[in-house]
């Protein structure tokens, strides 16, 4: 086989397989129903998690994942606001850092504080897993990562 023929054959093989590789996309890309710790209730020093559900839609754009987390209303009159997600994707998952505000009721006084949510997510087939760490500026309590799961 002549060198030009080998190059053309290799180029054709790459051209035929490249669309299949792109079509697979990132394992996190898609629509997920997630369960996560939506908040924490502190009564007399006893911390009780407040669980929630949401829809997380992630789309791959070049080397990044972007999307929206839309919480379900649950027992609240109005559901919490949606959160925008964006992160550089790695092979197995992504870490999303979301800056937002937390409403704290400290002994009857309601204050707003800056809050950072760090979502570390992975996917395997139709199962989503990971953690969410909530860090609140000047909070009188510590933060621990809480599990996130979804399908």
Image (tube, rainbow, N blue to C red):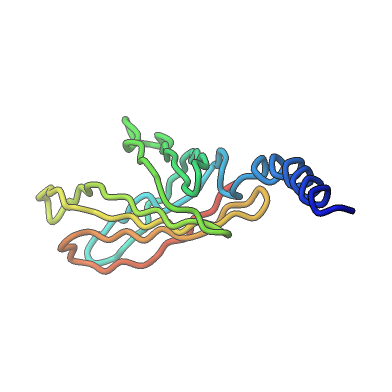
Q: Residue at x 31, y 66 (%)?
A: 143
In the displayed structure, 78 sits above or below 106; it is: above
Q: How many marks?
A: 0
List the single residue furthest toward the top.
Answer: 77
Q: Is 36 on the left-hand or right-hand side of 47?
A: right
Q: Residue at x 52, y 42 (%)?
A: 60
Q: Where residue 151 appears, x then y in whole percent? A: 60, 46
Q: Is 128 on the left-hand or right-hand side of 86?
A: right
In the displayed structure, 99 sits above or below 144; it is: above
Return the residue nearer the eye: 146 or 17: 17
Q: Where residue 109 appears, x then y in whole percent? A: 9, 50
Q: Is 78 on the left-hand or right-hand side of 147?
A: left
Return the residue nearer the eye: 53 or 61: 61
Return the residue nearer the eye: 60 or 140: 60
List the single residue furthest toward the left.
Answer: 109
Q: Residue at x 35, y 54 (%)?
A: 97
Q: Where residue 86 appears, x then y in whole percent? A: 40, 46
Return the residue nearer the eye: 86 or 108: 86
Q: Where residue 142 appears, x then y in whole percent? A: 26, 69
Picture quarter containing residue 44? Answer: bottom left
């Amino acid at each position: 086989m002549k060198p030009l023929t080998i190059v053309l054959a290799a180029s054709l093989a790459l051209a035929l397989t490249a669309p299949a590789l792109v079509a697979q996309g990132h394992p996190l890309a898609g629509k997920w129903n997630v369960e996560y710790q939506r908040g924490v209730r502190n009564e007399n020093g006893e911390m009780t998690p407040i669980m929630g559900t949401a829809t997380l839609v992630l789309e791959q754009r070049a080397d990044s994942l972007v999307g929206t987390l839309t919480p379900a209303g649950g027992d609240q009159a109005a559901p919490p606001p949606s959160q925008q997600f964006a992160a550089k994707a790695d092979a197995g998952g992504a870490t999303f850092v979301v800056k937002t505000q937390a409403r704290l009721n400290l002994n009857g006084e309601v204050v707003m504080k800056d809050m950072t949510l760090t979502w570390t997510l992975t996917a395997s087939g139709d199962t989503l897993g990971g953690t969410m760490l909530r860090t609140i500026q000047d909070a009188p309590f510590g933060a621990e990562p809480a599990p996130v799961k979804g399908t």
